[in-house]
Amino acid sequence: MFKLNHHIILVLIAIFNLLACTKNVNDYYTENKKPSIFPDYTDVVIPPNIAPLNFTVLEKGSRYHIEISSENGGRIIIEQSSPKICIPLRKWHKLLMENKSKTLNIDVYVKKESWVKYTSIRDSIVSENLDNHLVYRLINPVIVLWYKMGIYQRNLENFEEKAIYENKSEKDGCVNCHMFCKNNPDKMSLHFRQAYSGTVILNGDSLKKINTKTEKTIAAAAYPSWHPDGDIIAYSANQINQDFVSDYTKTSNVWDQVSDIVLYDVKRNLIFSDPKISTTSRENLPTWSPDGKWMYFISAPEVSEALNNQINCQYDLLRIAFDPNTYTFGEVDTILTSRQTGLSITFPLISPDGQYIVFAMTDIGYFTIYHRISDLYIMDLQTFEYRKLDINSTSNESYHSWSSNGRWLCFTSKRTDNIHSLPYFSYFDLNGNTHKPFVMPQEDPEFYNTFMKNYNRPELVTGEVKVNAIEMRDIVYGDPQSVIYEDNPSSLK
């Protein structure tokens, strides 16, 4: 009898809580300002498939009443004593899908001596989806703890995160430089240094590890870019150095002694290059135009004996024509120089429609993750006019990626605390304008207050990478397959 009464009491409590959470607040006064919330999800543009934008209300009170609504469908109502607002997943997705191209209203009431209603938060829901997965490296921001890292993927439609690889299984070696072919999760390149070094290539159902260092290349392949046809990958081959510096705007400086660009034929397992992209200058960070006819890259002068030249070099933005039918290159074009900008150009990446190229600029070098001074710029490839994007903050903005539909930019920013790089998303409209970015939502709205790692090189992909951490570990443990250097790749076509 006691157990029955106990269950009845629990059911009554649940019903009471449900009714309490669906009532309206009628007796309140208004505060003529928007509520302070963290993360800042006010006045942002969001895709209809994004996970709930859970947030914490920073206004003090004893109870919190939240109403989320739009033109179509019902309201989501949450009332509780905690300021941490966690939005029901299914109701959130239903509301957004029914209100594409409409306004999302978030009304916040806080119970102080009496209820206070703040000015409504109004976000815009666009019709274009964001690619539903993000792949990134997580690494400690403190240099001496660099060896604890991994490659992870996050489902952006919910809060599920999975490890693709964690280096705790391979003697703390460095894992980095992941890249995909046209946002395709089935075509990935992933590089390993130090312990069990090599490059892992996922190509459909094939997963293999290769050694890209040959007698005719200066180093193993590092920073990759898949040609849009999926048959070749351009890599930079870098002899990398790292120095600690006294400049407070940097924690360290990464620079190359030498660097060239090489190409890897995925089907034939061979490496080739061209004297125009493997000069005494330091060619680096290749990236392809969507039609595959141009390879863009950055280049700095060769290292001289002067320390100033080694560390304080600046990079120009170049491109070279490429014929994928003959594997031959044209002439190098100079697109933008550091002499013109006064800054070093790095991480170029072209929009899927081929109209724009977004790149970062910093004071020196190309490795911006440790720099305070780093901003994102955009160039129209029809006019070659460039401008600073308005999504920048006073802190570090760095590596970025495009969504497959070209309507979203993901980039890292340290704007929260000037220490940790977090992934942000910005809507890129048809007129080439970016909109106020928002940080990747988390199930716990206070996640970023305690999370102590950097998100590095976030790559948007259209689905889940179907390789788990155990499969990847087994491949990494194995011996790499040697590649062949081909002096005359055009003979193969």
Image (spheres, rainbow, N blue to C red):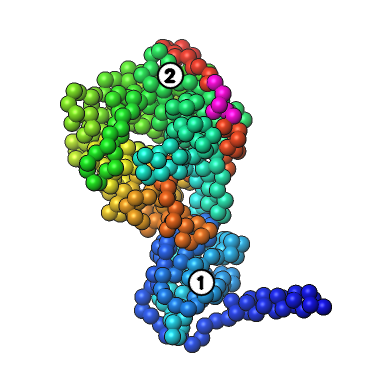
Q: Position of residue 464 (x, y in %)?
A: 58, 43
All told, the count of numbered labels is 2
**Magenta residue span:** 474-479
2 or 1: tag closer to the N-terminus: 1
Q: Position of residue 451 (x, y in %)?
A: 44, 53
**On the picture, is 228 further left or further right than 218?**
right
* Residue in the image at 21% along x and 34% along y: 312
* Image height of 383 relative to 214, above or below: below
Q: Do the CB atoms of the residues marked 2 and 1 lie less than 8 Å apart?
A: no
Q: Residue at image x 44%, y 56%?
A: 450
Identify which amino acid the numbered label 2 is placed on. Lys
User: Looking at the image, is 113 positioned above or below residue 68?
Assistant: below
- The main secondary structure of the magenta stretch is helix
Residue 478 is one of the magenta-drawn residues: yes
- The residue at which mark 1 appears reads as 82
Question: Distance from label 2 to label 1 (Cα)?
Answer: 56 Å
Determine whether the residue tagged by mark 1 lies in a helix, strand or loop: loop
